[in-house]
Every structure is written in structure tokens, then in C-alpha cells.
Amino acid sequence: MKAFALSGWALLPLRGFLGFTFCFAGLQKLANPNFFRSSDPAGIYAQMLAAIRVSPLHSVLSHLVRYSTPIGVLIALGELAVGLGVLAGLWTRVAAVGGVLLSLTLFLTVSFHSTPYYTGADIVFVFAWLPLVLAGSGGVLSLDATIAERARAVHSQGSIPPVTVPFSIVQRVCGHYEADRCQAMHGDPCDPGPCPYLHDARDEATVATQRRLGELTRREIVLGGAATAALGAAGLAAAGAAAGLGRAVGGTKPEASPVSLTPPRTPEHSTTTTVAPTGSGAATATTAAPPPGIAIGAAKDVPVGGSAHFTDPNTQSPSLVIQLKRNSFLAYDAVCPHAGCTVGYLASQQIIACPCHGSEFNPDNGDVIQGPAPRGLRRLEIAEGPNGDLYVAD
């Protein structure tokens, strides 16, 4: 019992960190309406699109990406539920299993190809949850322990300390013990496991003990269910408050609201010829042909010195176009090669940065300025057409 309590105190800092982190992560997602917008480059939709390229579960993600918003809500509420359960020490092992599943899912979808592998936080969280799966709360500062003590108190049992009986005592009082042999077991070596003396003593209390344990178990389930309902109500109230507050203040915003290009609805422009009416003497006018590739949107929607996000029509990956100087456009695949997060351009610092692990890239050529990204961003060929649209080479 002392060792068990000691393990509970030893795991308390880990419980606090994991519980707070998951509560914060869930509330942060719920408070940020941009997280659920498909047009936001840091939202759940863009993250799932990027994960399709690097995840071993890409075939599953490709079918789930259309449900990105409900999946994002489910992840946020799941993180909040796991965090509250671990902090309160209520159904701690169940909450820890939920933490393992969430962390493992994020590892397989987001950080599977993190290089080196230890720079991806998700795999660390998977193993950080395992001690709580094995030991639970350890009976320290937890509702699980409080409920168990309350149930025992109702049945006037109090705590159940373990009683250690030295085997030497069993040898002295047992009438069948002789020369390290048990006569009741036909002279077999004396062994505490199958000892008839201990076995008989245990049998006498078996029925009564099982009855009491059954009553305790039922009462613990009732009390645990009530505590779970109360904690769940508190969690939903916190989630609703975070979501409402986030929408009231506009959510978490980057240094500038992200711009997303809208592909033109008109068919691809081609060379056209306009012929003047007969007899007018006017010359034939021919419009210039657009550059090769697929139109992704209007060049005027990309601010000078700023950027805009678009979906590469060739790969369906999140991509980034930057207008560093007027009429000078550069485009890159916006998927960070480190862990698959979607990068963005920070105009104030004139760098392309990954919001997940801090990798930085040169906007002039996409090269790595600061890791942990192992390589630069893939550059896309882009050009402005005579009609004012931007075209990405296919």
C-alpha cells in the first residue's frame, strides 16, 4: 500500500502536466473559430490536407477530410474530457487510454515523419500516458480514491490495510508441517501458495467478502457516475464559454488575417481573335495567350509585401504565394517537410514560418533558415497572365 501511494505522488507532476496541457489544447481549439474554417491555412481542414501526404493513414484521411469540422470539434472535446479526467483523478485509467489514443492518432497523421523522430511531440505524449494507464491516479488527490473511501465508510469497512503473515508463523501453527514437508499434501515441499492452512482461512471469509465487495463496487459505480456527470457538465460549460468568448473577440488571429485565393469560375483563357466589321478598315486584334498552367485566382488578391494561400490544383496540397515586390510572385508548397504542418508568411519578419515546431524558410527561394525541417519548401512555377489571373504550371 505504501509503495502504491508513493507511485501516486511520483506520478502527480505528470498528471498535472498532461491534464493541464490537454485541457488547454481543447479549449484553445474551441476558442479559435479560425481552426474550423476550411479557408484558414492553420485550420483543421488544411492540417488534414497536409497530413494526407505524410501520414501512413493517407487513404483513410482522404475520405475523412470532408468531415474536418466535426472531427475538429470531436478532437477538442476529447482533449478536454481527457484533461479533466486526469486532473480530477476520475476514471484515471480510462482517461489515460483516451490520451494514448489521441496522441497516437496525432502521431500517425501529423508527426509520423518528424526527423529526427524525437522532435515530434506526439510520440512522447503516447509514452507519457502509459504510466497513468498502468497505475491510474495511485490513490493520491483523486476522486477515484475519495469515492472508494466513501463507499467503504458507508459499509463501515474503512480502509483495508494489507496484513502480512510471516510464513514462519504458518509453519509453527500448522500441524501438518514436518521437516520442510507438508503431510497434508503427501509430503510435498511446503509452499505458501497451495498451503491448506491459508487456503482454509481464506475459504471461510470468501462468501462474505465477495458480498461486501459487490456492494462496494455497485456503490462506487453510482458515485463515480454522478461525479462523471458533474465533471462533464462543468467541462461542457467551459467548452461553451470558450467557444462563445472566442467568437466574441474574433478568435486567435495571426499578425494579419490570412488571404485565400479563389480559383476563377470561367474556363481557361485562350488566344482569341476579334475581327472588325466589314468595311470598317480596322485591324484585326489578338489578345495574348495566358501562360501555361492552371489559374488559381486573381493577382490583385495577393497584397504587395504579403501572401495568400491556395490549393495546388495539381496535388491538392496547401500552397503559398508571396508578392515580395510589385508584380513579382513566388509560390511554394506550404507543407512543412518536418511534420506536415502548414506554413505561413510573416510579413513583419519577412520569413516563412511553421507554427508547429518553429522551422523558418527563406521567402526568396524556400531554403531552410532554421530547423528542425530537414530541407526547404518545394517551389512552384507561377506566373501572372494578361487577364490578371495567376497560373501554376501543371
Image (cartoon, rainbow, N blue to C red):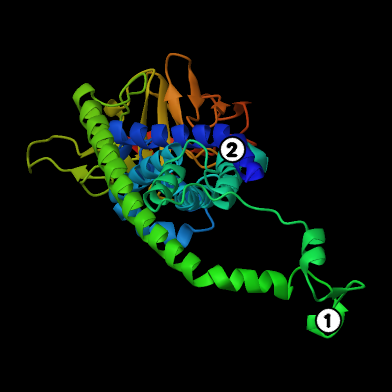
Which quadrant of the view contains residue 348? Answer: top left
Give residue 212's position: percent from left, percent from top. Answer: 43, 62
Spot the residue most to the top: 348
**Left or right of residue 391: residue 114:** right
Which quadrant of the view contains residue 203? Answer: bottom right
Relative to 184, does residue 143 appear above or below in the rendering?
Answer: above
Is 274 or 316 nearer to us in this picture?
Answer: 316
Total numbered labels? 2
User: Which mark's residue is nearer the viewer, 2 or 1?
Assistant: 1
Q: Residue at coordinates 74% horizontally, 73% vertically from top-left?
A: 195
**Left or right of residue 330: residue 269:** left
Dot 2: what SS?
Answer: helix
Give residue 361's position: percent from left, percent from top. Answer: 55, 27
Mark 2 Cα shell of 10 Å, populated few (<14), some (14-19), many (≥20): some
Q: Tell me the residue that label 2 is attached to.
A: 11
Callout 2 touching callout 1 (CB < 8 Å)? no
Relative to 186, does residue 175 appear above or below in the rendering?
Answer: above
Give residue 68's position: percent from left, percent from top. Answer: 32, 49
The answer to whether residue 193 of the structure is visible from this angle is yes
* Amino acid type, residue under disc 2 in the picture: Leu
Spot the residue most to the right: 179
Is 110 or 387 nearer to us in this picture?
Answer: 110
Q: Tell me the residue that label 1 is attached to.
A: 183
